[in-house]
Image (cartoon, rainbow, N blue to C red):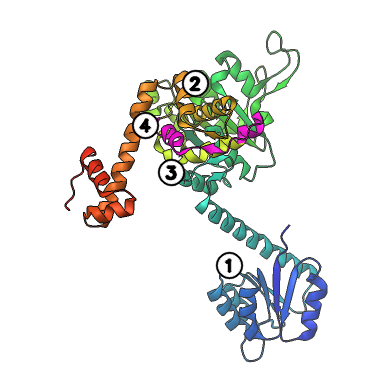
Amino acid sequence: MRKFTILAVDDEIDMLKTFEKILKKKYLLHTTTLVRDAIKMIVELKIDIVLLDIRMPKIDGLTLLRQIKATNPEVEVIIVSASNDIVSAVEAMKAGALDYVAKPFDINELCTVIEKAIEKRGLQLENLYLKEALAQATSFCDLIGKSQIMQNVFETIESVAKTDSRILITGESGTGKELVARAIHKNSQRANHPFIAVNCAAIPDNLLESELFGYEKGAFTGAMERKLGKFELADSGTIFLDEIGCMSSAMQSKLLRVIQDNCIDRVGGNSPISINIRLLAATNLNFTKAIANKTFREDLYYRLNVIPIHLPPLRERKEDIGLFLDYFMNKYNKELNRQVQGFDQKATLLLKTYDWPGNVRELQNIVERLLALSNSSIITRDEVEKNLSFYKIFPVDTLDQQFQSAVAGFEKAYITRALEQNNGNKTQAAKILGMARTTLLSKINALKLDHAT
């Protein structure tokens, strides 16, 4: 666990020794009697908290406080002074001090104030770390993506995870909606409590009520003992209702009451049971059509959709396909005891030409198949072509057409850029491209490019 760093600034040597006795074992403590050294120490030693006396020679504590806040506003400053001047205390708080402790101080009081400063500083560092990580992240709690659209999803998760707001996650099947729900729970204040996922589409409607709300002994034939439902099992934690669009109108009404009253009724029960849960829901349903067709309650939709998170299909973020290939290759190398090192350029390009209607889940299955059947260290275009056509993703002739089209598009853009950078001079462009001028002229004609000499 990280030790927080404290700097004590006081012109009295005895006071600095007192701080050392109290704080040295628990914190990284630095001390100085020289105000002019304080700012330098704060920067070089990465100080988290400053204990600062107000009444000091040459430069008073208030002046130093303002300098600290101007240099590094995140540093927490606690004024510890023999002065009982309330005016100085008020000025210090206005200037950015977290708290004020008067000398002679009670040790417990000082430690309590320091702990408060540590808690605040800890949250600042945590948020800073998350923001820096997200700024360059390609993965976040098992979600993968360097595309801007996925970076936006990561940032939204970070922003809303600490709240208890209801979240509706939408997206096509296979985009990773449950991963988003788990990421929200993992980064929430309920992370140490249960996460219960329920696939509403997988449970027959006549059983869904007892599955969610539980039942009492004797509630129906076969109910030999009381059973707790998913809502009670998720108490203090998070419940995730996947494919919520598959709920019947009757179940939608019951769920609406749960949201409104924060309580559930067991099947066969006589009294409501209070629950404390965070509700996350997901669906690939088109709510506009469902509400218009009266297959989904409009009031329930607005209750669920406090914060919307939409997961894009894989075809809208193809720049992430390379990341998924690496991720799933590493995963199945371990599971299948393979030593595949990667996909060659043509294989990767071929996989990027496909629109993946089954999204990430479909890509994952294909990578597993390729690794399971491959005997080489590099997956080639021929292997991809053979397995994709066998898998009936698309026929071989379509593969050739899409591959050639993708190659031509890349080549056209590459040559165009070289010509533009050289103001249309084909001789110079050919040198940059590493090809003969006659070859370049042939490609310009074939690709129907028109640039002046």
Image depth: mark 1 or mark 4 in front: 4
Question: Which mark, residue 274?
Answer: none
Amino acid type of the residue that numbered disc 4 sits on in the rendered structure: Phe
Q: Residue at x 59, y 42 (%)?
A: 141
Mark 3 or mark 2, whichever is nearer to me: 3
Q: Is residue 140 left or right of residue 351?
A: right
Q: Which residue is mark 4?
A: 403
Question: In the depicted view, which residue is nearer to us: 397 or 445?
Answer: 445
Q: Is 105 on the left-hand or right-hand side of 363? A: right
Which badge, 1 or 4, comes first in the chain's sequence?
Answer: 1
Per the image, the residue denoted by label 3 is 149
Q: Is residue 329 above or below residue 417?
A: above
Q: Is residue 86 visible?
A: no
Provide the secondary structure element on which disc 1 rests: loop
The residue beneath circle 1 is 74
Q: Residue furthest right?
A: 21
Mark 1 or 3, which is nearer the eye? 3
- State the CA–CA distance, disc 1 to disc 2: 48 Å
Q: Residues within 10 Å of mark 3 (few under 14, many from 20)?
A: some
Label 1, label 4: how far apart the Cα atoms are: 53 Å
Q: Earlier in the sequence, mark 3 or mark 2?
A: 3
Residue bearing the label numbered 2:
246
Q: Are marks 1 and 2 in contact (CB under 8 Å)?
A: no
Gap in angstroms between the C-alphas marked 4 and 3: 26 Å
Measuring from the top left, give residue 29's x and y in whole percent. 74, 72
Mark 3 to mark 2: distance in Å?
A: 28 Å
Asked which secondary structure carries label 3, the reply is helix
Residue furthest top as drawn: 221
**In which quadrant of the rendered view does residue 339 lie?**
top right
Against 417, residue 15 (above or below) is below
